[in-house]
Image: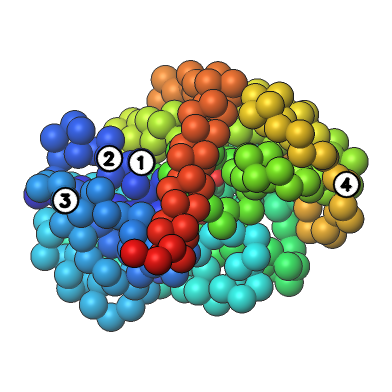
């Protein structure tokens, strides 16, 4: 008996696996490293209660291998992420979200396991209402630049609802809003890690347009707590917004990073991409009422921990580059 985490090598996957292990669960992780690195898993691979399978959740072997685990719960986080991957990995996003979710749901059906599908605020597309509540059906575009990701998450949600209705699978949906924290990839393009890396290395913080876009940032451990509450208390076939309501403009976030790091980096305005959404804000009434969830980590605290983590890893990378280059 174990808990399965797909996308276990990813940013949120590693935080989730760590929390589950700390609570004494056995965890089976799956990942194909399409948007992560094996090195990211180094620490977890030493943990006794953790078994890792390098595998595509949308591939042939997943059903067989996951089916042998006798899972009590499956957190389905596997999906390529990242704005630069929206075009190049659009098909892989759809495959992880349709074939992968279908396989996860079939395994859960056989095992009587609970499923949490890691959906996204992107199911709302470019929202015309703010904040977004779960009943809002979105302003989406099946042919737009974000189609693989957005439509993948939407069909994944639909599969969960259909399996809950038809087969009684307790499949629950977490609509995740922007999450940040230690352990994000050093290639990550989301504003918090991108601004922190720029500030620490003296580069410009690139703000799209006038930086008035509103974003909320949820700390990783708060998000993991939310995902686990969705598993424990969520209604099958229902979706729960998980995100902070502490909205900040992108410009204010850049200024907060500069202030906290003491950096002399300038803030530079660059052309805003057409698919950059105006406002992403969750209405979390349902999560508060039904799950008893709300984020507790203040942005300043989470940002400090994130800055420290990125600074440490950038330094380790510089040290490694220096020692490779120096004669012995
Ligand atoms: N972090 C956020 O702010 C955020 C916001 C909304 C939704 N989400 C969702 O939460 C989940 C986790 O996000 P994250 O930030 O940890 O992303 P991430 O890219 O760090 O992790 C995703 C992991 O899934 C793996 N993966 C992708 N396709 C796979 C496949 N077919 N088979 C096996 N593994 C596969 C990747 O290699 C990666 O390790 C994703 O589904 C993402 O869409 C995250």
Residue at horizontal 63 percent and vertical 40 percent from the top: 200
Q: Which residue carries the number 2 mark? A: 18
Label drawn at residue 46: 3
3 or 2: tag closer to the N-terminus: 2
| Circles 4, 3 touching at the beta carbon (< 8 Å) | no
Q: Which residue carries the number 4 mark? A: 269
Looking at the picture, tell me which residue is in the foreground, 11 or 6: 11
User: Mark 1 to mark 2: distance in Å?
Assistant: 5 Å
Give the label, 1 or 3, closer to the camera.
3
Give the label, 2 or 4, closer to the camera.
4
Residue 287 sits above or below residue 183 on the image: above
Q: Which residue carries the number 1 mark? A: 15
Residue 299 sits above or below residue 218 on the image: above
Residue at horizontal 36 percent and vertical 55 percent from the top: 40
Indicate left or right for 35 with 44 as reference: right
Q: Residues within 10 Å of mark 2 (few under 14, many from 20)?
A: some
| Circles 1, 2 touching at the beta carbon (< 8 Å) | yes
User: Mark 4 to mark 3: distance in Å?
Assistant: 44 Å
Looking at the picture, tell me which residue is in the foreground, 15 or 227: 15
Q: Is residue 91 visible?
A: yes
Give the label, 3 or 2, closer to the camera.
3
Residue at horizontal 34 percent and vertical 59 percent from the top: 39
- Location of the C terminus by quadrant is bottom left
Looking at the picture, tell me which residue is in the foreground, 93 or 302: 302
Secondary structure, mark 4, is strand
Residue 136 sits above or below residue 302 on the image: below
Give the label, 1 or 4, closer to the camera.
4
User: Mark 2 to mark 4: distance in Å?
Assistant: 38 Å
| Circles 1, 4 touching at the beta carbon (< 8 Å) | no
Residue 12 location (% of width, % of height)? 42, 46
Q: Is mark 4 within 8 Å of ligand 1?
A: no
User: Mark 1 to mark 4: distance in Å?
Assistant: 33 Å
């Amino acid at each position: 008996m174990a808990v399965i985490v797909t996308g276990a090598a990813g940013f949120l996957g590693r935080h989730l696996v760590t929390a589950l292990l700390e609570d004494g669960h056995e965890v089976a992780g799956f990942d194909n490293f399409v948007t992560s690195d094996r090195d990211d898993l180094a620490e977890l691979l030493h943990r006794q209660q953790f078994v890792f399978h390098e595998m595509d959740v949308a591939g042939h072997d997943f059903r067989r291998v996951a089916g042998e685990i006798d899972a009590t719960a499956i957190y389905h986080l596997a999906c390529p992420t990242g704005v630069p991957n929206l075009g190049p990995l659009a098909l892989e996003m759809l495959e992880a979200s349709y074939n992968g979710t279908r396989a996860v749901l079939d395994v859960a059906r056989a095992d009587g396991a609970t499923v949490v599908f890691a959906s996204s605020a992107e199911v709302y597309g470019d929202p015309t209402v703010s904040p977004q509540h779960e009943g809002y059906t979105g302003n989406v575009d099946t042919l737009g630049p974000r189609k693989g990701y957005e439509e993948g998450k939407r069909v994944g949600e639909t599969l969960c609802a259909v399996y809950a209705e038809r087969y009684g699978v307790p499949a629950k949906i977490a609509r995740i809003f922007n999450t940040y924290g230690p352990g994000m990839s050093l290639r990550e393009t989301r504003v918090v890690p991108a601004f922190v890396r720029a500030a620490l290395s003296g580069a410009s913080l690139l703000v799209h347009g006038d930086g008035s876009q509103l974003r909320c940032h949820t700390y990783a451990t708060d998000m993991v707590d939310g995902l686990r509450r969705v598993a424990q208390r969520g209604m099958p076939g229902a979706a729960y917004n998980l995100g902070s309501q502490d909205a900040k403009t992108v410009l204010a976030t850049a200024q907060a990073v500069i202030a906290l790091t003491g950096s002399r980096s300038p803030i530079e305005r660059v052309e805003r991409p057409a698919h950059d959404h105006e406002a992403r804000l969750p209405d979390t009434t349902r999560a508060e009422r039904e799950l008893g969830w709300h984020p507790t980590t203040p942005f300043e605290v989470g940002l400090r921990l994130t800055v420290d983590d990125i600074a440490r890893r950038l330094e380790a990378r510089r040290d490694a580059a220096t020692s490779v280059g120096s004669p012995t």
